[in-house]
Amino acid sequence: MTDAIDIEVPPTGSEKVTAELLIRSGLTLALAESCTGGLIAARLTEVPGASAFLERGVVCYANSAKRDWLQVPEAILNGVGAVSSECAEAMARGVRAAAGTDLGLAVTGIAGPGGGTAEKPVGTVYLALADDDQLHCERLSLSGSRRRIRELTLAKALDWLQSAARRHLQED
């Protein structure tokens, strides 16, 4: 029999600030992650109380998951592809609609080390955020290791969520 070792890994400042802002704002969130593989959800749920804002997080790595779970149109997947603004936007809208949340955040991209092309090199990531009024999408051109690309994407996603929560707090 082995002894269990409990190691406490506290959330970083950015995850904690994001969670606190989302809780204060009263906004709810659903996540659709591809190249980050659940990293955003994992980091946010390190913060106690995350259930106050996080309704669900889905990892939709395969095109079939994007189509079946998030209603990404086949025309997008077969046309511009899964790594595109159109796909990220459809993922954000799809996860938000499925969850019935205030916000839907989606990420799709190529974290590497392989899989890149001349048009979409490794480090190409699309981040999309949908709410009642807006749909914002941005193409990120990142570099570094697979881990670094995923961590940089996480940082950008947390920054977007903080901005959305701050805007909502200012409106109230």
Image (tube, rainbow, N blue to C red):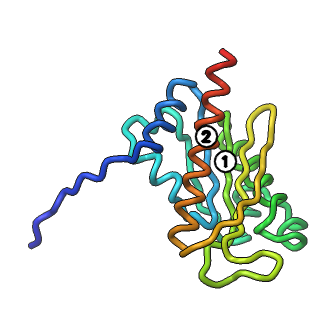
For the point 67% across and 71% down, the residue is 123
Secondary structure at numbered mark 1: strand
Please give the count of numbered marks on the rendered protein: 2
The reply to whether callout 2 and callout 1 are in contact (CB within 8 Å) is: yes
Q: Amino acid at mark 2?
A: Leu
Residue 62, percent from left and from top: 68, 72
Alpha carbon separation for disc pair 2 and 1: 8 Å
Left-right relation of 140 to 86: left
Give the residue at the far front of this rendering: 143
Give the residue at the far top of this rendering: 172
Number of residues whose C-alpha sits closer than 10 Å to that of mark 2, classed few (under 14), some (14–19) or many (20 or more): many
Q: Classify residue 127 by image quadrant.
A: bottom right
Left-right relation of 39 to 1: right
Nearest to N terminus: mark 2 or mark 1: 1
The quadrant the C terminus occupies is: top right
What residue is disc 1 on?
A: 105
Left-right relation of 74 to 25: right
The quadrant the N terminus occupies is: bottom left
For the point 65% across and 34% down, the residue is 164
Residue nearer the viewer, 35 or 28? 35
For the point 68% across and 53% down, the residue is 106
Q: Tag on residue 20? A: none
What residue is disc 2 on?
A: 161
Residue 15, percent from left and from top: 46, 44
Residue nearer the viewer, 71 or 91? 91
Residue 131, percent from left and from top: 74, 36
Q: Amino acid at mark 1?
A: Leu
For the point 55% across and 41% down, the residue is 55
Residue 125, percent from left and from top: 70, 64
Number of residues whose C-alpha sits closer than 10 Å to that of mark 1, classed few (under 14), some (14–19) or many (20 or more): many
Asked if 68 appears above or below 57 in the picture, the reply is below
